[in-house]
Amino acid sequence: MPVLYTERAEADLDQIAAYTRDKWGAAQCARYVESIGGCCRALADGSLSGRIHSTEWIYFRYRCRKHVIFYRHVDPATVLIVRVLHQRMLPELHLANAEDSISR
């Protein structure tokens, strides 16, 4: 099942990678970012599933390590990763207009 990312989700992943690299080094950064990518792929292929996150937007959420992946099913064969937020961030402050643009 394909995985699409919004530009904001890609920016989230870039920020996570930069912070992790600066704080813990390149090897840990690679492992951490790959684990998030693995969760995204598993959500897409159905081997993992999240819970409904109910705000004014209906997304699923899945906690992956210290981050939460917000996503939705575009169609039965495609998952859109909307945002990847740290577990301490308030989703309601970061999900508005999260789907302004989809990266391919």
Image (cartoon, helix red, strand yellow):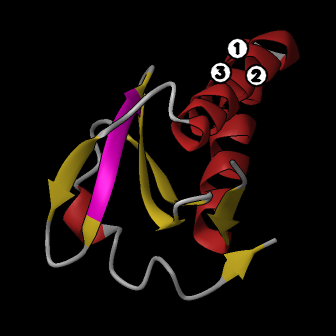
Counting residues from the N terminus, which is met first, the one under dot 3 or under dot 2? 2
Where does the image place residue 30, in percent across and percent down from the top left? 81, 21
Q: Does the segment drawn in magenta span residue 102?
A: no
Q: Secondary structure at mark 1?
A: helix
Q: CA distance from mark 2 to mark 1?
A: 7 Å
Residue 34 lies left or right of residue 75; in this view the side is: right
Q: Is residue 75 above or below residue 14?
A: below
Q: Which residues are magenta?
A: 59-63
Judging by the rendered image, the residue that carries numbered circle 1 is 24
Three-letter amino acid code at the position of disc 1: Trp
Sort mark 2 into few (<14), some (14-19) or many (20+) by Cα contacts within 10 Å: some
Q: Secondary structure at mark 3?
A: helix
Residue 16 lies left or right of residue 31; in this view the side is: left
Q: Are marks 2 and 1 in contact (CB under 8 Å)?
A: yes
Three-letter amino acid code at the position of disc 2: Cys
Sort mark 1 into few (<14), some (14-19) or many (20+) by Cα contacts within 10 Å: few
Circle 2 or circle 1, nearest the eye: 2
Near-viewer residue (46 or 60):
46
Judging by the rendered image, the residue that carries numbered circle 2 is 29
Sort mark 3 into few (<14), some (14-19) or many (20+) by Cα contacts within 10 Å: some
Q: Is residue 56 above or below residue 70?
A: below
Q: CA distance from mark 3 to mark 2?
A: 10 Å
- The quarter of the picture where residue 67 lies is top left
Three-letter amino acid code at the position of disc 3: Ser
Near-viewer residue (45 or 64):
45
Question: How many numbered discs, if any?
Answer: 3
Residue 39 lies left or right of residue 4; in this view the side is: left
Kindly identify which numbered label has been placed on residue 90: none
Kindly identify which numbered label has been placed on residue 35: 3
